[in-house]
Image (spheres, helix red, strand yellow):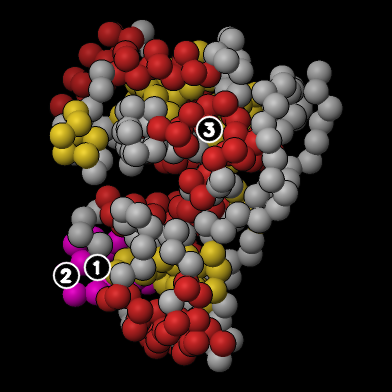
């Protein structure tokens, strides 16, 4: 059995609450998935939202400007938009500098560092607020070994990006804890890190250290303990498959849960690439994971049924269960109970 080690997180920060969620000019709800994720899982910490003209996403919490948010006790502006490329557009600069002038901190989960923008950097120098870069890895770089380690690990994987891997991992962690099974959610993206307060921003890691950083995130543990690791991207998505593979190897998962959105016709951001077949995705993930965990298996399929009515949802889940002989559910609606039944 591997020696038990303490977790050395790549990022472990304190983000002051409550939050003002910056939704910016998000063109659709998927672009604002970070905002929705934080509100869905810690709404009590969200004092309001800030939206620019043309924003197509609504979190259903109060609309506030920076001054109003500061007056109501907000401490940090969370940038809740996950745009392609992770950039800070010109239209955001004025409101973000205003946030700093109001004494608010800004937590940024995008790839573009805020201090690379002169106006924001200058405003921060005279503000009591701070700039918090969630995607700036810190700590020692670690090369993966692939050596067996004690404890159990579950990884969520997907047919595409933005299909519910984080929501599924959070729901499964909560259900395990409800059953008094020791479990921890391990965040690997900016939204999960905002919710959990620590984690590894795997898509910001140097490629050589992706798997190693995940090994550090979920090290050897008590034999009864489960680490539930948030997946990223998809092995079948040409833009992000490298991160997905690094997660598979670093997590060394005993169990996989496939996440899928059934109404989508093409890969996120790639209009000419169709969604792959579920069986094909499952087999490719198993094949990749077996390199570090020969006994890995799927324990369920998590389906994002947001765009299906109740009748269509029930019919789809039933058909999927019949085809794959695995529990199939929408964990955000049902808590992941049938998947955890299969897991334990």
Looking at the image, is 311 positioned above or below residue 296?
Answer: below
Locate residue 210: give its quadrant: top right
* Numbered label attached to residue 247: 3
Element type where label 1 sits in the image = loop
Question: Residue 95 location, x and y as percent?
Answer: 35, 81
The answer to whether residue 119 is above or below residue 286 is below
Q: Which mark is residue 25?
A: 1
Q: CA distance from mark 2 to mark 3?
A: 36 Å
Magenta span: 48-61
10 Å crowding of disc 3: few (<14), some (14-19), many (20+) = many
Whether residue 302 is visible to the viewer of this picture, yes or no, is no
| Callout 2 touching callout 1 (CB < 8 Å) | yes
Q: Which residue is mark 2?
A: 54
Disc 3 from disc 1: Cα separation: 31 Å
Q: Is residue 95 left or right of residue 185?
A: left
Q: Position of residue 119 (x, y in %)?
A: 42, 84
SS category of the residue bearing label 3: helix
Coordinates of residue 219 in the picture (x, y in percent)? 71, 33
Q: Is residue 49 magenta?
A: yes
């Amino acid at each position: 059995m591997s020696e038990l080690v303490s977790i050395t997180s790549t990022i472990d920060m304190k983000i002051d609450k409550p939050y003002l969620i910056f939704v910016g000019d998000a063109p659709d709800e998927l672009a604002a998935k970070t905002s929705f994720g934080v509100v869905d899982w810690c709404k009590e910490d969200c004092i309001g939202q800030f939206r620019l003209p043309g924003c197509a996403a609504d979190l259903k919490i109060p609309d506030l400007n920076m001054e109003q948010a500061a007056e109501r006790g907000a401490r940090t502006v969370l940038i809740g938009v996950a745009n392609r490329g992770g950039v800070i557009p010109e239209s955001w600069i004025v409101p973000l500098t205003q946030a700093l002038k109001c004494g608010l901190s800004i937590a940024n989960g995008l790839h573009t560092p805020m201090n690379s923008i002169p106006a924001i950097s200058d405003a921060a120098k005279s503000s009591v607020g701070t700039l918090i870069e969630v995607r700036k890895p810190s700590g020692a770089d670690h090369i993966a070994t692939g050596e067996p380690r004690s404890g159990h690990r579950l990884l969520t994987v997907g047919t595409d990006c933005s299909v519910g891997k984080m929501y599924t991992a959070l729901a499964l962690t909560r259900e395990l804890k409800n059953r008094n099974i020791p479990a921890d959610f391990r965040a690997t993206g900016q939204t999960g890190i905002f919710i959990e307060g620590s984690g590894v921003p795997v898509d910001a890691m140097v490629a050589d250290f992706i798997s190693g950083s995940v090994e550090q995130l979920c090290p050897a543990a008590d034999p009864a303990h489960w680490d539930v690791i948030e997946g990223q991207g998809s092995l079948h998505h040409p833009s992000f498959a490298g991160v997905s593979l690094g997660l598979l190897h670093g997590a060394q998962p005993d169990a996989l849960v496939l996440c899928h959105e059934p109404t989508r016709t093409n890969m996120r951001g790639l209009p000419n690439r169709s969604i792959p077949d579920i069986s094909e995705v499952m087999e490719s993930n198993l094949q990749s994971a077996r390199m570090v965990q020969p006994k890995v298996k799927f324990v369920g399929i998590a389906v994002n049924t947001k765009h299906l009515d109740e009748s269509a949802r029930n019919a789809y889940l039933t058909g999927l269960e019949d085809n794959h002989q695995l529990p199939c559910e929408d964990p955000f609606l049902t808590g992941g109970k049938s998947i955890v039944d299969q897991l334990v």
